[in-house]
Image: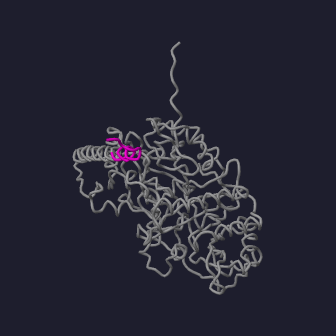
Amino acid sequence: MGYSNNNIILIFLCITNLLRFIIGSSSSGDFIECLTVQLESSNSATDDLIYTPSNNSYASLLIAQNLRPGSTSPYNKPLIIFTPFYDYQIQSAIYCSKKLRIQIRVRSGGHDYEGLSHTSRDNPFVVVDMRNLRQISIDAEQKTAWVEVGATLGQLYHTLAQKSGTLAFTAGVCPTVGIGGHLSGGGYGMMSRRHSIAADHITDARIMNVDGQILDRRSMGEDLFWAIRGGGGTSFGIVIAFKVNLITVPETVTVFNVTKTYEQNATQLVHRWQYIADKVDENLLMRVFLRSVRSLTTGKRTVIASFTTLYLGGVEDLMPIMKVKFPELGLVEKDCTKMSWIQSVLFFAYIPNQPLNVLLNRTTPFTVYFKGKSDYVTEPIPVDGLIGIWRFLHEEDENMAEIQFSPYGGAINSFSESETPFPHRTGNIFMIDYGLSWDSPGNEEAEKHLNWMRRIYGYMAAYVSKSPRGAYFNYRDLDLGVNNYSSGNIIGSYDEAKVWGMKYFKNNFERLVRVKTKVDPSNFFRNEQSIPPFPLQPMYSS
């Protein structure tokens, strides 16, 4: 009896999937056995440390705000989620990973745009989830803090508020984002024009290298310390904690969120904003959020531009600045609200009037399928270019696509391009964050929205930075390129990585590769967009 080609393909897929399952099950068992032996030898119980897909808590630990990464295949989820409480437990995971040649992924908060902290194209792999290493120690007198990477931004902000009404830290607005990824990749936030980005405030760190040794700034050396302040930590080791300088903020700050529709001159206002956003008083940061909605008056789709703003000072000082620099917005005093800095954290996280304890939540109440991209703008986008953006926004369902314009300038420019791996300094007016969400699962639905994202990204090429076209590492985008580890090549390709690496890091990419080659030449710590080492050069005898 003969078999059709379709039947042969089906049989092949069934056999392949069965082999993957058997290999995965075997690898999982071997890793658990190795890890158990290592932990028991150090008198450490394994309860509440190891989670496999058969554990009830596995799914809840794995869940991330972005459902897209890993949604199309069951084979790129981790064999094990390991949740250590102590440094030596991480050492055990590294030992077993090297012994069994099972890849490690490190997760701090799980907000990676492409899910690289908890999904992988390679199998098998395990996740070291740092959520239990979240201690925060604040020295209010010295204005410093040691923060373990499993803490979230919300936890840090909450802890600071318990200590002082004027001690703060410059970082992002989303309270559930993990410290580890955010700080090591840059860390832009609402105070960045006054106090720069989070990575610029790191003064020390504790990192575990490929040999399981724990290093501080002095023992790791300045090259590695440079690399983990904007170049991402997971390419070089497992960062355990950062020491940061805190900042002082006024007892009262001022916020406003003024929204204008297309019919209310939004296009001209956004166009004008570009000429002042990076040049106004550095205590003032005005972000612009662009969306397509249905008009309450006409019932038709319209574009709205929300000017979401923090001013580190009182409204009496803000109003004169706005009247001189941006009178077109028509800001009036009643648009503004005075509050403490910690209340502004809630305001910008869209959870105003909530108790401060809401900042301790590690997860958001909603999850979506999401794709993001980023760009940098060095010359104002003309009006016709903005109108083209509006057309794209109307193509998607209302409120599902959002484009953010985040201003640069001020303190961000006080650092040179090479002072840290984060190179996006002088010359950038603002950063663009393209975000698109959808609710329905499936490849066909995803491809429809991904196609929209790629088309608008292509359209914007004429209006953004060039040679290279810049991108923000914390807004990870695998469309820019990925490392290829096929055919047993775990080193990857420098030339392939340079394509995306130059976009994130510009000329700093070369130095990052040199650091990687020095500290992890075998590329033990790797993912689809990790820094590769230079390939080992063959030795020839004369």
> Whole-percent x and y of residue 294?
61, 80
User: Is residue 474 one of those drawn in magenta?
Assistant: no
The spot of residue 176 in percent (x, y) is: 45, 66
Q: Main secondary structure of the magenta part?
A: helix
Name the foreground residue: 357 vs 214: 357
Q: Nearer the viewer, residue 451 or 102?
A: 451
Q: Is residue 254 visible?
A: no
Q: Position of residue 327 (x, y in %)?
A: 76, 78
Question: Is 468 drawn above or below residue 317 in the view shown?
Answer: above
Query: In the figure, residue 372 lies in which quadrant?
Result: bottom right
Residue 210: image x %, image y %?
41, 40
Q: Going by the picture, which residue comes out furthest to the front?
A: 1
Q: Which residues are magenta?
A: 1-14
Q: Residue at x 43, y 40 (%)?
A: 524
Left or right of 97 on screen, residue 517:
right
- Left or right: residue 340 versus residue 207 is right
- Quadrant for the N terminus in the image: top left
Q: What residue appears at the point 75 percent right and 75 percent down from the top-left corner?
A: 326
Name the residue at 44% across, 43% down.
525
* Image: 496 above or below 161: above
Q: Is 408 above or below relative to 105?
A: below
Say if residue 475 shows up in the picture.
yes
**Magenta stretch contains residue 13:** yes
